[in-house]
Image: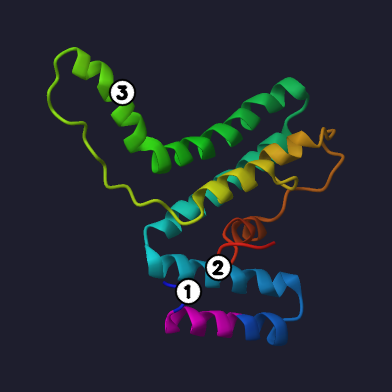
Amino acid sequence: MLFHRAPFLWLLGATFVAHWWMLRTQRARNPLLLAASVVFYARWNPWLVPLVAGTALYDYRMALAIEAATGERARRRPLAAAVAVPLGLLAFFKYTNFLVAQAWWPLRALGVQAPPPIFDIVLPLDISFYTFETIADPSSTAGAENRQVVPGSVSRPLPASSRARWGRRFPTSGR
């Protein structure tokens, strides 16, 4: 879905009207924004919807695991996973071809004449921003750890629907 085409403008207009004039509470607006984001991403590339949903759910589960852990040592494992998995996804989508090309140089020195393979990987829209924001966000995962909180002393992480909507803001930017 392109920003200057009619389908996006209709989706934006309908979302704007429903958000500001029909729905009065943030609790009612979150499902609308989440649905608009899903439609937006599905129109561009449908396989992104499960990817985004899966990363939002994973991020939420890691936030709950960090909160439930007692003691600093117990929080390290879910914290490391909460940072490593999103960075791994970012590395896969953004840097696979670069890393394969770099790893191919030693093979050429050993006599391999074939060119390195080039993978046709579609880069998800806004993946770098999304990855680093979810790691740094103080209401979830690693961001909760960055606040140096005492377990049980702060409110629970944002609900999963809010996390999913926050992570995939409609269309892609702004708080």
**In 3D space, how far apart are the residues under numbered discs 2 and 3 (Cα atoms)?**
37 Å
Residue at figure coordinates x 69%, y 61% from the top left: 175
Q: 105 or 136, which lies in front?
A: 105
Instruction: Tell me, yes or no, whether the highlighted magenta stretch contains residue 54.
Output: no
| 25 relative position to 38: left or right | right
Residue at figure coordinates x 52%, y 36% from the top left: 87
Above or below residue 28? Residue 172 is above
Specify which label sits upstream in the sequence, 1 or 2.
1
Specify which label sits upstream in the sequence, 2 or 3.
3
Mark 1–mark 2 CB contact (< 8 Å): yes
In the rendered image, which residue does mark 2 sit on?
171
Instruction: Tell me, yes or no, whether the highlighted magenta stretch contains residue 13.
Output: yes
**In 3D space, how far apart are the residues under numbered discs 1 and 3 (Cα atoms)?**
38 Å
In the rendered image, which residue does mark 1 sit on?
3
**What mark, if any, has residue 103 been given in the picture?**
3
How many marks can you see? 3
Give, as a three-letter code, the residue at label 2: Pro
Highlighted range, magenta: 5-15
Give, as a three-letter code, the residue at label 3: Ala
Give, as a three-letter code, the residue at label 1: Phe
Which quadrant, please, contains the N terminus?
Answer: bottom left
